[in-house]
Amino acid sequence: MASVFLLQRTQFIPAPLQQAWDFFSNPNNLAKITPPYMRFTVTSPPDDRKVYPGQVITYTVCPLMGIPLEWMTEIVHVRDGAYFVDEQRVGPYRLWHHQHHFREVPGGVEMTDTIHYRLPLGWLGRLAHTLFVRRQLENLFAYRYRVVQEYFG
């Protein structure tokens, strides 16, 4: 049985809901919250619209040893100001389902990322998860946490 892993992170953002939503629902801001060593680049045509169901976003990213990978996600669900969900269509994961939830709280917004993911290659994928994938995702979200705090701080 293949393992489906879960990563969940919650962050308080000291900003109005609309400001947080505007930032995170704009795919052009993804590179700003991704560590520079990953060389994350949006490759889909420029689109100044906020996320919408059916939107396809393509990127290149170098998560491991500088090797570039193509990644394509589709925005599958959006509730304006509340949440959006992206799913990988092409990329390094066998499954990638990423929920972004926003909730107004006193003094700002509580943002929760919930990611269900599965790696390819059966037991080799599980080993890779144990050796470096989990740690890399945790480091990515730790970086994102710091950048978001600085940006909205």
Image (cartoon, grey):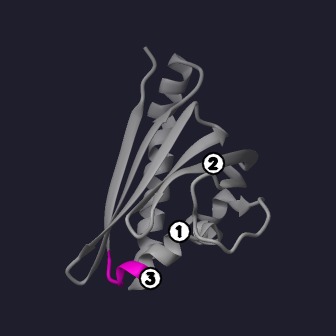
Q: Position of residue 88 (x, y in %)?
A: 60, 42
Is disc 1 placed on a helix, strand or loop?
A: loop
Q: Which of the image's four quarters has the C terminus?
A: bottom left
Report the Cα–Cα distance between label 3 and label 2: 24 Å
Asked if residue 137 shows in the view, the reply is yes
Query: Residue 15 in magenta?
Result: yes
The range drawn in magenta is: 13-18
Report the Cα–Cα distance between label 1 and label 2: 14 Å
Report crowding for label 3: few under 14, some 14 to 19, many 20 or more residues within 10 A (C-alpha).
some
Is disc 3 placed on a helix, strand or loop?
A: helix
Q: Position of residue 30 (x, y in %)?
A: 60, 66
Residue 49 or 61: which is nearer the viewer?
Answer: 49
Q: Position of residue 48 (x, y in %)?
A: 68, 75
In the displayed orientation, state which residue is furthest to the left: 106
Q: Which mark, residue 19?
A: 3
With 2 as the anchor, is 92 left or right in this view?
right
Q: Is residue 1 above or below residue 60?
A: above
Report crowding for label 2: few under 14, some 14 to 19, many 20 or more residues within 10 A (C-alpha).
many
With 47 as the anchor, is 21 left or right in this view?
left
Report the Cα–Cα distance between label 3 and label 1: 10 Å
The amino acid marked with disc number 2 is Thr
Q: Residue at x 41, y 70 (%)?
A: 81
Of labels 3 and 2, earlier in sequence is 3
Query: Which residue is under mark 2?
Result: 73
Query: Which residue is under mark 1?
Result: 25
Q: Residue at x 69, y 46 (%)?
A: 71
